[in-house]
Amino acid sequence: MRNTFPINKFRELRTPFYYYDTTLLRHTLGSIRQELARTPMFRVHYAVKANANPKLLAIIRESGLGADCVSGGEIRAAVQAGFPADRIVFAGVGKADWEIDLALDYGIACFNVESAAELKVINELATARNTTAKVALRINPNVGAHTHANIATGLSENKFGIAMQDMDEVIDLALSLPHVEFQGLHFHIGSQILDMGDFVALCNRVNELLARLEARRVWVHYLNVGGGLGVDYAHPNRQSMPDFGSYFDVYRTHLKLRSYQTVHFELGRSVVAQCGTLVSHVLYIKQGVNKKFLILDAGMTDLIRPALYQAYHKIENLTPADESSKEAYDVVGPVCESSDVFGKSVDLCKAQRGDLIAIRSAGAYGEVMASEYNCRTLPTGYITEELL
């Protein structure tokens, strides 16, 4: 299915704003649930960092997914949205003491631990509360992912996770600490991955590590393989959600699971990216020396991905006077930075001042990363039900 836009309602709203097609979101969640029904040992935790809009969190929680959090604030947001604490996992390379205490107080399902130093602190804080923290160790499998360098996280030398050569030592430490309960292993090789071969390589590495641990009589009950599944930014209408079947089939086929193991996934972008659109309007059309600039009221403060990652988003003119006439524009925002550019030489229906412009596939890492730089107002997020 594809996004549908209530254009007449859009005209009544102050731009820029985010619009979330909740029909598409629910369809996406339904597809994930179908895959989980096929394999009962699979669990999915929605990665809250992708989009923490409380209206979306409520819909995702209703679908039965758990939550993957990377901060104390995200844990609070997940709990407030109704996610059960025993379905919340907590990752992050720099967990502050107050965040660990918060997670312990809530009784979350698992800490994804990223260093021996963090493991010791969790044990100290759990001791002070006379409780036990369930932990999984995040191991860097040294598997390269075909994605942008800034969102590849599985190589051996990385701020995230524990190097493979240190795995046994840190497991021994976890097993020795009285207020830590070792559950298993956690992995995450990167984000916006479209090559299923990357996930096959991860499965092969996990199989190697499990065999190595079993030889030591260390049993891993909990496997968390992270997320990373990408979306089609170029064709949001033609492919409005990822091929979840092929994704989960990789793990069904290539991961050598034991009967006592559960496998946990942390999907974020693939859940919400395609349902979200940043809607703006044209302020000015400026004729340059060799090009035309389409100047919007939305900027990098509303959607930073193009400036941060040189990320591509499909851009559409929703209200052209003439749909048959096309022109090429550099689509830019009002922020006082040269990097405030959404796209260069973008072919659009000929635009004029006041036209509504849609920047597609913006449901992930869009509204959640917005800022008030230049003292700009944060964009509002609307869902389908609010505009009916």
Image (spheres, rainbow, N blue to C red):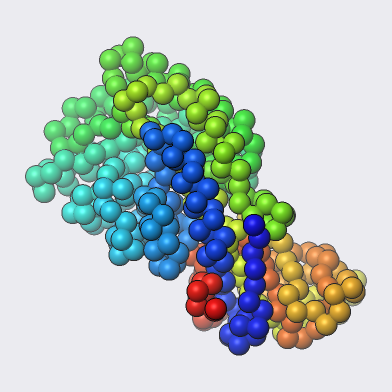
Towards the viewer: 304 or 120: 304
Q: Quadrant of the C terminus?
A: bottom right
- The residue lying toward the viewer, choosing from 44 and 27, is 27
Above or below, 223 relative to 379:
above
Coordinates of residue 89 in the picture (x, y in percent):
33, 46
Q: Quadrant of the N terminus?
A: bottom right
Describe residue 375's horizontal placement relative to residue 300 as left or right. Answer: left
Most distant residue in the top direction: 215
Question: Percent from the top left, x then y, of residue 295?
Answer: 73, 78
Q: Looking at the image, which residue is at 39% across and 63% down?
A: 58
State the residue at coordinates (41%, 54%): 63
Q: Hey, which quadrant is residue 23 in on the image?
A: bottom right
Residue 341 falls left or right of residue 154: right
- x 52%, y 36%: residue: 248
Report whether 125 appears left or right of 325: left
Q: Is residue 73 visible?
A: no
